[in-house]
Image: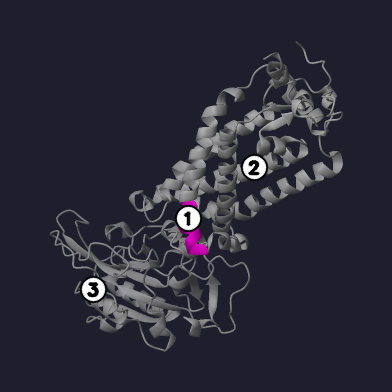
Amino acid sequence: MSQQSMIDRYTSGERILHWVTAITFFLLAASGLAFFHPSMFWLTGLLGGGTWARILHPFIGVVMFVAFILMAVKFWHHNVLSGNDRKWLGQIGDVIANRDDRVPPIGRYNPGQKILFWVLLASMIVLLVSGIAIWQPYFAPSFSIGTVRFGALMHALSALALILLIIVHVYSSFWVKGSTEGMLSGKVSRAWAKAHHPKWYEEVARK
Amino acid sequence: MALQSLDIERRSATTTPPPGAREQPQVAKLIDVSRCIGCKACQVACQEWNDLRSEVGHNVGVLDNPLDLDEHSWTVMRYAEVEPEGGNLEWLIRKDGCMHCADPGCLKACPAPGAIVQYSNGIVDFHQENCIGCGYCVAGCPFDVPRISKKDSKAYKCTLCSDRVAVGLEPACVKSCPTGAIMFGTKEDMTHHAEGRVAELNERGFANAGLYDPQGVGGTHVMYVLPHADNPEAYSGLPKDPTIAASVGTWKGPLKPVGLALLGLTALGAFIHYLKYGRKEVEHEAEGGGERGPRGEA
């Protein structure tokens, strides 16, 4: 593939933010699941044991939140539902079954990615707020027991939603061949752009 | 407490049966509030036996000292002046501390394997060497008992002197009580004894006297004889019908298997999708033709 056939999709800054979010997410999901269910407790070993996992988890969480929010500031305007999005969602069956010739053309992000973006943002905010309420030993003691209990439940619920969406996100990046490479190198092929994000490709080609 | 490892009924964050070869009779501590004179001998005995010393605090104008439970004070006397009926003044004194619930909210909430155990005799004990300091036990407890140490971030509370009980002794507080207001024995004996005391109190005009053994937490292994059992809140906020909070029950109950199953099914669904439909691959990459071709609207 010649250099010319590649086009820029992500700057190095955007990619660094993405992968900081991804790596911190992985550590948080592992230690969080360890606190969530006994069958996963062994995952605390990843952070150096139960007590270390308890100490580090919230700090890593703050790093993930900051990285994600910086990314959200850069990307939110690409993620407003518009144009063919409703139509695309109506034909989600064709999308899933790889009948791409029938799928209406969409822009830089497809509606699935856009919805993912907003739900991720919501769960990040809930995770931060509830996480502060249950953060031992610094903040939890200053909240009422009722708040801590509710915070723990919300933290678990939003974390489950987040992990579930990330499973979908990771699989999708594998499913749509070339996507992971795009987030690693910052470049995608013209063919990839034309096939998966035709309206975005037109914009880029016009420049 | 390795010596007691053969008679554990429940172990935190453990889904297989804990060592349970031996079975012991259920024990209980009975605190007869009507016989308590508030001398704090039990507080002193607790600190002495367990080798603990709270920091000397400040007098805030009431007898309560220390004002609250902490990692060094596993039991405190709480004093309440109340007027149950017009004109009367009653001084209600309650020895506060872990109630050793049959269905312990702390143990249910604890994520660290073996940090909280319930022995087959009913005593709920914290094993600090397994504690990770997350504070979930604080959220799980319906009685606001566990305290996280500021020094080591481990959770502490009354052990019901499990070390003494294991060798056939009564808890230190029981041993020290000068009026015999604190008693210890099998739960059956203590319940029976309490019935007699309640009948006596009824005769003496305390029509609402009763035994506090709240069934919302499966009963407790620390029970009170209360002259005003109809209003336990009068005794410095003893909850009337304590249960594990619904939020904790959901979080550490059905959400655990349901949550994990959802994650597992999502991953499985993704794999099946791959097997059925495969990846979206772009053909003719070299010519930049793409399978969609140039037919997007202009």
Which circle, 2 or 1, is nearer the viewer? Answer: 1
Residue at image x 71%, y 45%?
Answer: B266
> Residue A188 is drawn in which quadrant?
top right
Q: Is residue A40 magenta?
A: no
Q: Chain of mark 3?
A: B
- Name the one closer to the observer, A150 or A7: A7
Which amino acid, by three-letter code, is at mark 3? Answer: Cys
Report how far apart the C-alphas of labels 1 and 3 lie in the structure.
46 Å
Mark 1 residue element: helix
- Name the one closer to the observer, B250 or B226: B250
Image height check: is B146 above or below A186? Answer: below
Decide whether the magenta segment is chiefly helix, strand or loop: helix
Query: Residue B107 at x, y = what percent?
Result: 49, 65
- Name the one closer to the observer, B234 or B271: B271
Residue at image x 57%, y 28%?
Answer: A75
Q: Residues within 10 Å of mark 1 (few under 14, many from 20)?
A: some
Which amino acid, by three-letter code, is at mark 2? Answer: Ile
Mark 3 residue element: loop
Q: Which mark is residue A166?
A: 2
* Residue marked by disc 3: B36
Magenta-drawn segment? A49-58
